[in-house]
Amino acid sequence: MHASLGWLSPVPAGADVVTLIAPSDSGIYREFTQAFQRKVAALCGRRKDLEICVSDDSIVFSTIGDDRAAPATGNGGLLIPLGTIAAEHIASQSDVGPTLFALIPADTFQRLRECCLGLDDGPGTAIFVGQPVDQQLRLIRALLPDALRVGVLLGPTSGQHTDEIRRSGERIGLEVRIENVVDPETIGLVLRRMAPDIDALLAVPDPLIFNRATIANILLASYRYELPVIGYSEALVRSGATAAVFSDVDQLAETTALTVLDYCENGVLRPPGFPLDFSVGVNREVLRSLGLQAESEDALKKTLSEGSR
Amino acid sequence: MRRELTTRRRILLAGLLPLVLFTAVLAHVFVWDRLQAQQRSFEQLGESYARELAAAARYGLFILDEAELRELANSFIHRKHVHGVEIRGSGNRLTIIEGPFDPNGREDRFLRSYTEKVLPQPVVAIEDDPAFGVVASGEMAALPGLGAVTVTLTSREARLEAWDLILKSLGLMLGGLLLAAGLLWRASLRIARPIESITGVVRLAADGQFDQRAHTGATDELARLEQGVNAMLDALQQHHQELQQRIADATAELQTRNLQLEQARHEALHASRAKSEFLAHMSHEIRTPMNGILGFVELLGQESLQESQRTKVAFIHDSARELMTVIDQVLDFSRIEAGHIDLSHEPLDIRGIAASVCRLLSPEAADRGIECRLEIAESVPALLIGDRTRLRQILSNLVSNAIKYTPGGSVDISIDAEVLPEALCGLTLSVEDTGIGIAEQDLENIFKPFTQVDIGDRRHYQGTGLGLAIVRRLAEAMNADIRVDSKPGKGSRFEVRIRLPVAATTQPLPVQAEHRPGDDRLAGIRVLAVDDNRVNRHLLEAMLGVHGAEVRQASSGMEAIAAATRERFDVVLMDVHMPGMGGIEASREIRALEGYARVPILAVSADAFSKTLIEREMPDLAGFLIKPVEEPVLVQAIEDCVGPRGQGADRPSSTETVESATLGPAMQVQEPSILAMFLEDLPAEIAAIDAAFSAHDWRRLREALHRLKGAAAVCSVERIYASIHAMQEAIQADDVAAAQACLARLHEAAHEMTGKTRE
C-alpha cells in the first residue's frame, strides 16, 4: 500500500509513498525516522477510524543525492525533508510536490517560504522544532514567581520576533528587555551590560547568538551574574541552562506522524506549527547553585499546559 | 723507554678508563637530556601558561571585561619565568599588557613568547539536540575567536638552573668517579696483593729459597693459583732437597776421593822422600865401602909388594875407580831425575875449574896416549856468578867422554867469553877431540840416558851412557845451549854456551896443585874436630895428623864452644847433626867468639841432600864435606881454607867446596884401632838405644841411633847400619812394633859383630 501525499489538495488515499529525505542516515535523522515509523505504526494500530493507513513499506528513507529520492519528487508522494539542509535541498528544486518539513526551526521555514516556496500558498507545511516563546515565558513565571524583568538577546534571525516576544511578556506579566546583537563578539559585552537590569535571561533560538561556541560563555556569564537562563532545548539544560521547555524526537515524530496520517486521511496538510506535545527540563544543580527551588518537571509541564490553555 | 705497567695500575686503568668514559658519556647524556627536558619543560610551561591564560581569559574576553582581564594578567605576571603578559581581544577591541617592557620586543635573547588563541568553549552536547544539530549545523561549523593571549617567559632563571644542574652533575660525576676509584683501588689491592705475594714467593724460589709459601687469603681463582704455586714450590723444594742430597753425596764422595788422592799424594811424597833418602843412603852405602876399598888398595900399594902383586893391586885400584865413577854417575843422574838440582849462585873461577878438570883427567888421557890441552881466552872474566860444582861436572863429563872415545890424538879444551850488556858474559865451553866421531843419525841419541851409539868394538868404550845425559840435564837447568858437531872417524866437538853474570872481583885464581898423602902440608894448622861419634872424631884426627895438623876433639856443640874459648883454632870441622846443640847452632856460637869471625868452619854431614839447606842456614861456611870424608878431599878443603903449609905451602888455596866423587883416589882411614874403638863403644850405644826405647824417649832414641849409625857407616858394619836405618824409618812412621823388630835385629847384628871380632 502506497500512501498518496498531496499538497493542500485532496490526494487519493494510499496513492503514494512517504519519503523521508535527510542529509545522512545517522544521528538524529535515523532516530527520527525510526521514531516516525513507530509512531505511524502505533497510530495506525490505535486509531481504528483510519481507513487507510501508511504501512512500513510505503515509508521510504532517502539521503540527499540518493536515486531513491528522485521518484519522491513530483510523483504525488509526500516528501518529508528532515532538517534545514534537506529542507533547503528540496526547496531549491522545482516542481516539488507536497512536502512536510520536519526538524526545522520556524525562522528557517519562514525564510524558505519567502525565498523559494512561496508564502502562504506554498506546497508545504512544517513541524517546527522547539516550543513557542510563550511556553518559555510561562516557565520563567513558574520557576521565578518573583521575576519581573526578562532579558532577551536577539540576532539577525530572531530579531523579527521582537514584538511578539515583547507582547508575550506583557501577557504573562514580565518586562522583556531585548538587546539586538549584530556582532557575535559583543554578545558578552551586551550581556554584561544587560545583566544588572534583568532577573532572568530568555534564550531564543538564533544561530548567531546561541550556538556551540557561545552557549558556554553565555551560560557562564549568566551564572556569574546569577541570572537563570531559560532555554529552548534539552541540550541547553544539559549545558548549564536553568530550565527549558522543548519537544523531543518522539514528540516531534508523533506530531509528524499525525500530520502525515491526517494528510493521508484527508489529503490536506495541516498548517505549519510546533509539536503538540512538549517536555520541561530542569538542571537541578544550577538551580540549587542559584539558590532556587522548583517543582518537578511534570508539575511544571502541567502548569505550562494549563497556562497555554 | 716504555715503562711497564704494574698489575695494580692495569686494573685501575682497565676499571677507570671505561668508567670515566661511561660516566662522561652518561653525564653528558644526562645533562643534555636534563637540559633538553628543561628546555621542553620551559616550552611546555610557556605553552601551558598561554593555554591556561587563554582559558582564563575566555570569559573576560567574552564579556570584554578589561578589569578582570588585567587582574588575570597581573596574576600571571608573578608566575615563575613570566616576563610579560599580553591579552588582546579580537578586532583589537581590547589590549592588556602586563610586564616591564613590550612583550613583542625580541631584543632580549632570553625572552620567548607563547601565543594562544582564545577560542570559545564548544558545547558538543547540542549536536544531538534537534534544536541545534538539525537546525544550525551550517552555522556551527566555524568558531569565531575571542582574541589571543601572549605570555613571554625569560630563560634567565632557567639558564641558572641549567648551570646549577651541570655543576651538580659534574660534582656527582666526580664524586662517583672518586668513589669508584677508591673501590677499584681496593679491588686492585685485593687482586694485586695476592699476585705480588705469589710473585715474591716465586722470586725467592728463583733465588733458591724454597721454604717460603704464598699465603694470600684469597678465596677465588687466586686461591687456586696460590695452591698451584705452593704445590709447585713443594715439588721444587723436594727436588731441590733431593738435588742437595745428591750434591752432598757427590761432595762426600768427592771428599773421600780427595782424601784418597791426598793419601795417595802423601804416599807418593813419602815414596819420593823414601826414594831420596834411599838415594842418599845408597850414595852413602855404596861409596863408603868403595872408599874403603880404594883407601886400603892405595895403602896396600904403598907397601913393599912384588911386581906381580903390585900389578894386581893397580888393576884392583883402576877397577875400583871405574866402578866409583859409574856409581857416581848413576847417583848423580838419579838425583837430577828426582828434581834435586839446586843451582847455587856463587862466585866461581872458571879458569881454575877448567884447569882442575884438565889436571885431574890428564893422567887418564896420558895413559891412553892422548894429549889434553887447555886454552883460555883473555876475554874470560876472572870471576863469574854461578854453580861451580855443576859447571865442573859438565866440563868434566865432556872431557872424560872425549878421552873415552878418542883412541889417539888430542883433546882440546877451550874457554871463550863474550861480553854482554848488563854485566853478563856469554861463556862458551868447548871440548874437541880427534876420536871416532858420531854418525849423523846418532847425534840425537847421544844425550839420551843409558844410550850408547853403535860402535864397532864396544869392549873398548864401556860406560853407563849417562855422562852426556847428565850434561844435557845440567845445561838445561842452567838455561845453557849445548851443540855437537861430529864426523865419524874425524872427531867430535861439543860446545856449551851459557850466560852468567860477571862477579865484581876480577882477580884470576891460580890453578890447583896435586897433593900427596903423608906429607906435612898441614903442619902447624890447629884443627877442632867436632863430632858426637868418637869413631868419626878419631878418623878425622888420623887423616889430618898424617899431614902434620894439630887436631883437638869435641864430642858436642857445647864442648866445641868451650874448646874454642880456651884455645885458638885455624879450622873447625863441625858435624851438622849432633844431639843437644846442633852443628849449625854451635857454629854460630863459635863465630860469635872473639877472634873467630873469620875462622873457616867446614860442615861435615852424612846427608848429601842437606847441603843446600845447611848452606842456607850458614851462608858463611867455608865448605861442605860429605861423610865419609876422603882424606884428599879433607886435606884439600883445609888447604883451601887456610892455605898450604909445609911442602905444599906455595900452592894457593881455594874457597870452593869439593866433593869426593870428583876427586882422585882418597885414603880411607879405617884402621883396626878405630874398629876396636867402635866395638868398644857398641854395647854402651846399644844400651842407650834400649833405654831410650823402653822409656819411649824418641828424641833421645833418634840421637842415639844417629850417633851409632854414623860410626857404623865409618866402620862399614853393614848389618848394624841397616838395622839402625830401618829402626829410624819405623820411628819416623810411629810404628813401634816395627821399631821393636828392628831393635831385635840390631841386637843380633851387634851380637854377631862382637862374636866375629872375638873369633
Image (cartoon, coloured by chain):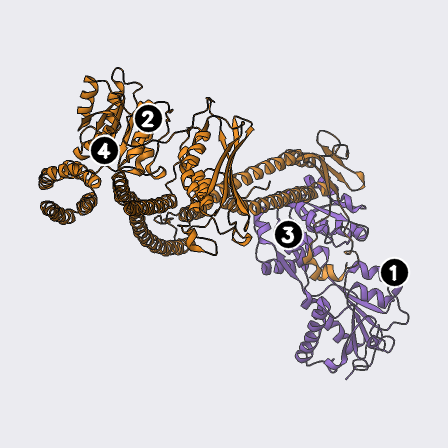
Chain colours: A purple, B orange
Q: Based on the displayed image, in which of its 4 quarters is residue A6 positioned?
A: bottom right
Residue A210 percent across, percent down from the top left: 74, 52
- Out of A137 and B491, give the one closest to the viewer: B491
Residue B63 percent across, percent down from the top left: 72, 41
- Residue located 72% across and 50% down the image: A214
Q: Say which mark, if any, is on residue B577.
A: 4
- Classify A308 as above or below B507: below
Do callouts 1 and 2 mark residues in contact (Cβ within 8 Å)?
no
Residue kind at label 4, given as amino acid type: His
Q: Is residue A65 left or right of residue B273?
A: right
Residue B530 percent across, percent down from the top left: 21, 28
Look at mark 2 in the image and give the residue it sits on: B639
Look at mark 3 in the image and give the residue it sits on: A240
Task: Determine the CA span between mark 4 and mark 2.
Answer: 24 Å
In this rendering, which labeled residue sits more in front, label 4 or label 1? Answer: 4
Residue kind at label 2, given as amino acid type: Glu
Label 4 residue SS? loop
Label 3 residue SS? loop
**Residue A55 visible somewhere in the drawing:** no
Do callouts 3 and 1 mark residues in contact (Cβ within 8 Å)?
no
* 1 and 2 marks on the same chain: no
Q: Say which mark, if any, is on residue A114.
A: 1
Count neighbours of disc 3 (C-alpha within 10 A) and say few if under 14, some if 14 to 19, many if 20 or more.
Answer: many
